[in-house]
Image (tube, rainbow, N blue to C red):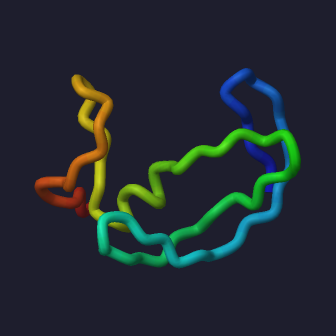
Amino acid sequence: MKFKTINGEIVERKVGHVLVEYAGDEAPTTTVLAEDGDGNVFGLHGLESLGLEVDPTTQQIRKSEALLAL
């Protein structure tokens, strides 16, 4: 699958499914399998699968008040 990096570079990486854990909560999520030299990023799918969000003012992870249902 192709992805655009933060600096605008297009890269191709494999994806997989993993079980993630944070503060005692576990949830399945999709992950991009990094290669040597890639950065480490925990993305939106992982955060949302655990019911988490980033507070825009403090930049801290917090529990979401409610999940968006579309």
Q: Position of residue 10 (x, y in %)?
A: 83, 35
The residue shown at (30%, 45%) is 61
Q: Position of residue 17 (x, y in %)?
A: 63, 76
Q: Quadrant of residue 27?
A: bottom left
Q: Nearer the viewer, residue 23 or 8?
A: 23
* Quarter of the image where the C terminus is located: bottom left
Q: Residue at x 22, y 23 (%)?
A: 57
Q: Quadrant of the N terminus?
A: bottom right
Picture layout, residue 21 above or below residue 61: below
Instruction: Identify which residue is drawn at 73% across, 21% down.
Output: 7
Q: Position of residue 64 (x, y in %)?
A: 19, 54
Give above or below for 31 relative to 56.
below
Residue at the outermost left position: 65
Residue located 81% across and 28% down the image = 9
Q: Quadrant of residue 18?
A: bottom right
Task: Indicate left or right for 26 with 64 as reference.
Answer: right
* Residue toward you, 21 or 32: 21
- The answer to whether 30 is drawn above or below residue 40 in the figure is below
Instruction: Tell me if residue 64 comes above or below residue 54 in the rendering.
Output: below
